[in-house]
Amino acid sequence: MPGSDLQRFLVGGVALLAIFSAIFHPLPAAAQDVAATKAELASAKIPAQRMKQYSDLAVQWMEEYLRIDTTNPPGNEKRAATFFKKILDQEGIENVVFEYAPGRADLWARIPHTTAQAQRPIILLNHMDVVTSDPSHWKVPPFSGSTVNGSMYGRGAQDMKDEGLAQLVVMVMLKREKTALNRDVIFLAVSDEEAAGTGTDWMIGHHRDLLGNAEFLINEGGENLLENGKVRYVGVDVGEKTPLWLHMVAHGRPGHGSRPNTDSAPNRLIRALDRVIQYRTPLKVLPVVEEFLRDMAPYEPAERAQQFRNIRDAIEDKNFQDQVERDESLNFLLRNTISLTMLGGSEQTNVIPPDAWANLDVRLLPGEDPKPFLGSIRQVVNDPDVTVDPQNAEFRVANASPTDTVLFDAIRRVAQQYFPGTPVVPRLTSGYTENQRYRPLGINAYGFSPFTATQEEGNTEHGNDERIRVEELRRGPKVLYDVVASVAGTR
Ligand SMILES: [Zn+2]
């Protein structure tokens, strides 16, 4: 979808939803926030003893789940699917395992709506595979699931066996509590997210029907940052940037290193790269980023707050442009970015090679068309002996979901109950998630985590000593249950 179409789609969707909510919700979202009380949370109806049982189950099952080695490659996610299936079968929840390749499987489960008329389903999506780990750098073995000082360790404890498990417990809670539902709740555990994404590809390719024209999807992503014992913000991912990896090759006359030649391939490459890294891609303000910065403004020093509130004006200012350039966490939100990551030339010090190459990790904003971007890079390179081409033939234009939906509103309201006074902000992330694959199906897909994590805990994702605090494991399913019940439950 070209950029202008996406923009139209987003604007159109938001306008439509605004009309819809004006008809069905007499109170604006902000007024509803104020009106919400603790008793409105669906979990308040669950007796404390049963709530404790769900928390106990979450801890016990998480330990078992972390012990299943689903390192990808090779994945072996069938083992995890079998683990989920056993629990779902015991609980009498409809489910199917699809072994789409040897050892690799997707699992689909559903709790059907209970009302005569149903709204479109909500999907709880998780991936069962985890990235590799090197036990020699870990305090405890990565597949031990052991608890040390109140934290449970294991590869996947943050990404994303924790959330997959919370989603499973929510399914069990909905079933046991006989929660009245006005839409189907679908649990979808996929394989291979950390590599080629074949699990999601297979599901969409072969069983689009089982996704039932879903309206909403909750997936990994989002960040609820815990700082000095307080949640700084509840970040909900509404869009992601997508990679456009480029391969650059310079050509030149080869020769002996003892006889320098100014137009050699490595020299040409370095000059071209210098132009590329000096190049400042245009600053752009997407509506989601504008909303995020406005929401975060009250937590910034005065000058920064002013800039965040008026970001469209701020980006015209030369000083602010320089600040953006130096601020990693702000820069990627406002432009397409280019990182030089790989370089290659001669195999020998005394040989001038005929070719020298570099790889660039480019990340494009939602809606960006790769063709004009590539054109601008070639213009910047401006050398007929230097070629720039995408590494992959396929490119999918990045997308985003609007914030004006009942699911986003539900997250806002539930988060206010658990973390009063904490802003709930929409985020654009620099990394890719499978939300990108589901949004083109007409699904509003968000990255939302029911857990909080400190910066240090968050950094263990894909790192060493990946872990989650047991108290988060105990509370997470309850938070997610309240969000799901708020969107899918009848009142
Ligand atoms: Zn993940």
Image (tube, helix red, strand yellow):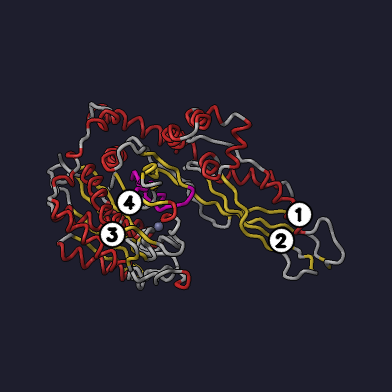
Q: Residue at x 72, y 50 (%)?
A: 272
Q: Residues within 10 Å of mark 2 (few under 14, many from 20)?
A: many
Q: Is residue 409 magenta?
A: no
Q: Earlier in the sequence, mark 3 or mark 1?
A: 3
Residue extent of the magenta highlight: 430-450
In this view, the mark in front (4 or 1): 4
- What amino acid type is highlighted by mark number 1? Arg
Residue where numbered disc 1 is placed: 268
Q: Nearer the viewer, residue 110 or 4?
A: 110
Residue 371, position as x, y percentages in the image: 58, 45
Q: Is 188 on the left or on the right of 278, as rendered?
A: left
Residue 85, position as x, y percentages in the image: 23, 66
Q: Earlier in the sequence, mark 4 or mark 2?
A: 2
In this view, the mark in front (3 or 1): 3
Residue where numbered disc 4 is placed: 451
Q: Residues within 10 Å of mark 3 (few under 14, many from 20)?
A: many
Q: Which mark is residue 165?
A: 3
Find out whether the residues at labels 1 and 2 contact each other: C-beta distance under 8 Å: yes
Q: Is residue 435 magenta?
A: yes
Q: Which mark is residue 453?
A: none
Q: Residue at x 63, y 54 (%)?
A: 340
